Amino acid sequence: MALLYLLLAVTARTDIRKPGNAQLRVALFINGTLGDKSFFDSAAHGMDQARKTLPVFAKIIEGGVDPTRWEAALTDLADSGEYDLIITGTFAMVPYVQKLAEEFPENHFMVFDAAVDYQKCRCKNVHSMLFRQNEGAYLAGFLAQKLMQNGLPDVVPGSGLGVIGGMQISVIEDFFTGFRAGAKAASSDAQILSQFANSFSDPAAGKDIAKAQYARGVGLIFHAAGATGQGVNEAAAEARRYAIGVDIDQYALYRVSNPQRAARIVTSVIKNVDVGILRAVQQQLAGSLAYGQIESLGLAEGGVRLVRDSDVMAKVPAEVLKSLNETERAVIEKRVQVPGVFTQMPIASGDASVKSKP
């Protein structure tokens, strides 16, 4: 019965490597579906890289958009005993991981873009990986405000900024906290409109919100909204305004298929989920993945970055680029402390030397 439920609830992609040839068996559970051209696709790319370059057997399971199915599907994975490492992401999955970590103490789990509460659960078999997306967003906000001060084609100098989030959760708030701080660092009088779409999979809602913000004088919108953000990009092209995306290179996404849309994407804050997952699988193979603690990857560790390749970036004034580069160095060297939602959490940096196994 459990197997039937799993087949109904999820879709699995299994790699072609024979299990007998693998030194490690890894499962990635996606609490959603692939094809978002953003966060989940980046996670899947990390698994694809692992299966191509490492002696691992990997499976990607799409849990679908119905949250009531996620716990049962993840429980089936843990109960099967087939995997050396079970990976899942987002704060929505944290309660399930905390519960299963205690029920299956011999299993190994990893959560990315989220962290379990080690003070409240027996989670010595869980590795948590956070990204300091606020640092990348800080650079995006700084650049965005500089561009609004100078003006862009079809956008008058002094236009405002907007932010659109998928849902009002900690990770998205972390993006926006960094973006606002960066914009204010560029100009203390930066004006920023903010709204949430209450969905990561509704491009139509993203487009409607973006159109409303552009109509109110916003020249550039920063969106952290998964597939919903594709509607923001569409609205930017139609309104002849601009957008900045996250997670994957939004400009590269449209450069060939839709050059008009690509021309309106300034840059993207890349959260290298794929790099983080590949790195974790490599560490698990080496026996050095740090269980029982939170790891944080930011600009210094290559966990996040700001894309510099786009039509707009190619025309950014040299003095603005110089200022942006200086700001990035200041963040990396910790001369600038970027505010964020997770700054008070006990987190080890990405190059922490303390490693433990359960």
Image (tube, rainbow, N blue to C red):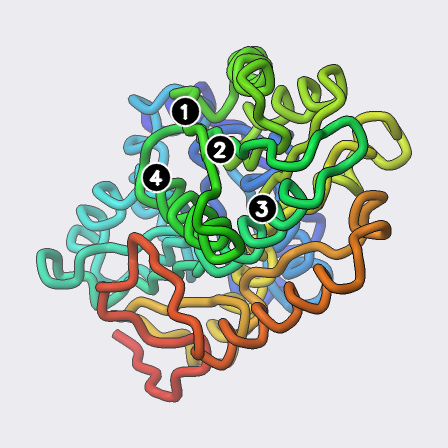
- Mark 2 or mark 3: whose residue is earlier in sequence: 3
- Mark 4 or mark 1: whose residue is earlier in sequence: 4
Mark 3–mark 1 Cα distance, whole angstroms, equals 18 Å
**Image depth: mark 3 or mark 1 in front:** 3
Of residue 165 and residue 219, the one placed in the foreground of this image is 219
* Residue tagged 3: 145
Tag 4, which secondary structure? helix
* Residue tagged 4: 74
Looking at the rendered image, the quarter that the N terminus falls into is top left
Question: Does residue 232 lie above or below 245 as drawn?
Answer: above
Mark 2–mark 1 Cα distance, whole angstroms, equals 7 Å
Q: Classify mark 4: residues with Cα within 10 Å, few (<14), some (14-19) or many (20+).
A: many
Asked whether residue 44 is in view, the answer is: no
Q: Is residue 122 left or right of residue 267?
A: left
Give the image location of residue 289, x and y in percent: 41, 74
**Image depth: mark 4 or mark 1 in front:** 1
The numbered dot on residue 348 is none
Dots 4, 2 in contact, CB < 8 A: no
For the point 72% across and 39% down, the residue is 151
* Residue tagged 2: 163
